[in-house]
Image: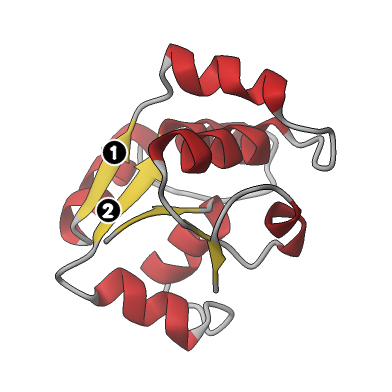
Amino acid sequence: MKYILDTHAFLWFICEDKQLSRNACDIIRKRDNEIYFSAGSAWEISIKTGLGRLSIREELESFLIDQLAVNRTLSLPITLSHAAFTRNLPTIHKDPFDRILIAQSIVEDMPLITRDRTMGKYDVKVVW
């Protein structure tokens, strides 16, 4: 099965943070699953490191590429369809990073691995 990671799920997984649920961890680790990391999450991490709200000591692009490879995670670009679909979303969630992940999840028909309960208010399958 295919899944999209929310940014926090990706970061918690690579850091082995206990905040990641056992179910989410099992889904990510299961070899039969295809796990996707959105370019929107890369953008969010870039913004947050620039603001000092997140610390990544290595060069960001290399770090992300390495982590995706090590963790068998696929990169999901933001397409025109994804961006345009955000217009169809009700304004339940105002965070642009979350809105693009929701749009990608809907357009690509992939469940979203997230702890964010607000995302579940959209027509998207959320797993945690």
- Name the one closer to the observer, 72 or 82: 82
- Name the one closer to the observer, 49 or 45: 45
Left or right? Give the position of 2 relative to 124. Answer: left
Q: Looking at the picture, how far across and down is residue 96, in whole percent?
A: 70, 30
Which amino acid does the dot numbered 2 rest on? Gln
Whichever of callouts 1 and 2 sits on the residue coming sooner in the sequence is: 2
115 is higher (above) or lower (below) than 103? below
Indicate the quadrant where residue 60 lies.
top left
Q: Which mark is residue 75?
A: 1
Indicate the quadrant where residue 70 lies.
bottom left
Q: Which residue is drawn at 49% across and 43% down?
A: 105
Which amino acid does the dot numbered 1 rest on? Ser
Secondary structure of residue under mark 1? strand
Indicate the quadrant where residue 52 lies.
top right
Q: Looking at the picture, how far across and down is residue 65, in whole percent?
A: 25, 41
Q: How many marks?
A: 2
Q: What is the crowding at mark 1: few (fewer than 14 residues within 10 Å), some, or many (at least 20)?
A: some
| Camera-side mark, 1 or 2 | 1
Q: Residue at x 58, y 32 (%)?
A: 100
Q: Residue at x 53, y 85 (%)?
A: 18
Mark 1–mark 2 Cα distance, whole angstroms, equals 11 Å
Task: Name the residue that disc number 2 marks.
Answer: 67
Secondary structure of residue under mark 2? helix
**Disc 1 and disc 2 in contact, CB within 8 angstroms:** no
Quarter holding the C terminus is bottom right
Q: Which colour scheme is used?
A: secondary structure
